[in-house]
Image: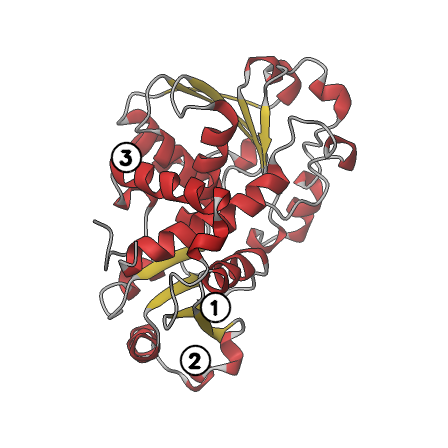
């Protein structure tokens, strides 16, 4: 039963609970008209302390397609935050108006802190470089849809693995499935943080290797998860300029990839995937975007207890 629960970390839910969300997601995709009034009378609060179009629109579209309504802000400067209101008070206040809240925050750990004060279910829509659990649910569903299983996969993460919160969340989530192998491809400066290696990969005894060249390993992959180098996470612009085009996936690099490789990307992309790849049947990233809305529909309905 997920009614009334928070989603802060992708490991907040059991494998069985994730399975129930994915099963309901598939029902919604197959018969969306049946669920168009599932959340009539319900309100989603969207508190975005950090810029986002894709995730915010996805949450808002999800609630509107369920028949509910949306309130909130996309710029904290236009809210009482500008007057100095604390995160706890903002959540208490908006939780008095809304039935469920989706919050993105630039500070890592803000959702864990905020969940103590939020009177309604709180969904972490991304906190700093830490977690992005609803993107993780989207990624898991897209992998399941593409491969038919979440077990027995070799997954390559390529790009900014240091600041890529979607990478950190997906590694944690995949750690519970069987026979998973990770190949981590990045410049040395953007390698996966040490806590992911010790607290997740090490503790679970997961099989992983690190490298810098995508060309050397692309033929081994079942899933290729590309990420952009995130300009907003760098303190030194010169470092960003030096690293931003470290990896560009094009059709030439895909010549040695498996025919059933699935290419994912949390988007937005900059230069890391050439547009010529978009027409390749292995490119799943735009389907991934659409899946995100349906997964969020299923999640909202489950947390509200209307399904």
Residue 36: image x %, image y %?
A: 46, 60
> How would you rate the neighbour count of disc 2 (Cα within 10 Å): few for under 14, some for 14-19, many for 20 or more?
some
Q: Which mark is residue 81?
A: 2
Residue 175: image x %, image y %?
A: 33, 29
Q: Is residue 269 above or below residue 152?
A: below
Q: Quadrant of residue 246?
A: top right
The front one of 127 and 223 is 223
Q: Can you identify the residue that label 3 sits on? A: 15
Mark 3 secondary-structure assignment: helix
Q: Can you identify the residue that label 1 sits on? A: 49
Could you tell which of marks 3 and 1 lies nearer the N-terminus?
3
Name the residue located 36 percent from the left edge and 58 percent from the top edge: 123
Q: How is the image coloured?
A: secondary structure
Locate residue 123 relative to residue 78 in the image: left or right.
left
The front one of 139 and 224 is 139
Mark 2 secondary-structure assignment: helix
In the rendered image, is residue 8 in sight?
Answer: yes
């Amino acid at each position: 039963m997920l009614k009334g629960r928070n989603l802060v970390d992708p490991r907040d839910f059991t494998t069985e609970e994730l399975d129930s969300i994915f099963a309901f997601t598939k029902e919604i995709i197959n018969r969306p008209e049946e669920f168009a009034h599932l959340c009539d009378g319900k309100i989603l609060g969207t508190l975005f302390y950090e810029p986002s179009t894709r995730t915010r629109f996805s949450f808002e579209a999800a609630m509107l397609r369920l028949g509910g309504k949306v309130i909130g802000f996309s710029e904290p400067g236009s809210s009482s935050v500008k007057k100095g209101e604390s995160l706890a008070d903002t959540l208490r206040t908006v939780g008095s108006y809304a039935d469920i809240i989706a919050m993105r925050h630039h500070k890592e750990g803000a959702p864990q802190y905020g969940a103590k004060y939020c009177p309604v279910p709180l969904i972490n829509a991304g906190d700093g470089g830490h977690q992005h659990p609803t993107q993780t649910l989207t990624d898991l569903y897209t992998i399941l849809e593409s491969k038919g299983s979440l077990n027995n996969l070799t997954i390559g993460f390529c790009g900014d693995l240091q600041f890529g919160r979607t990478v950190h969340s997906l590694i944690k989530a995949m750690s519970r499935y069987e026979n998973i192998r990770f190949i981590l491809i990045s410049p040395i400066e953007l390698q996966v943080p040490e806590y992911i290696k010790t607290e997740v990969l090490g503790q679970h005894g997961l099989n992983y290797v690190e490298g810098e060249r995508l060309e050397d390993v692309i033929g081994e992959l079942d899933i290729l998860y590309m990420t952009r180098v995130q300009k907003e996470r760098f303190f030194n612009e010169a470092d960003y300029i030096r690293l931003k085009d470290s990896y560009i996936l094009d059709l030439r690099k895909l010549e040695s990839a498996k025919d059933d490789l699935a290419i994912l990307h949390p988007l937005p992309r900059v230069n890391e995937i050439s547009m010529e790849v978009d027409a390749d049947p292995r490119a799943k990233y735009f389907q991934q975007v659409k899946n995100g809305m349906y997964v969020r529909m299923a999640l909202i309905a489950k947390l509200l207890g209307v399904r």
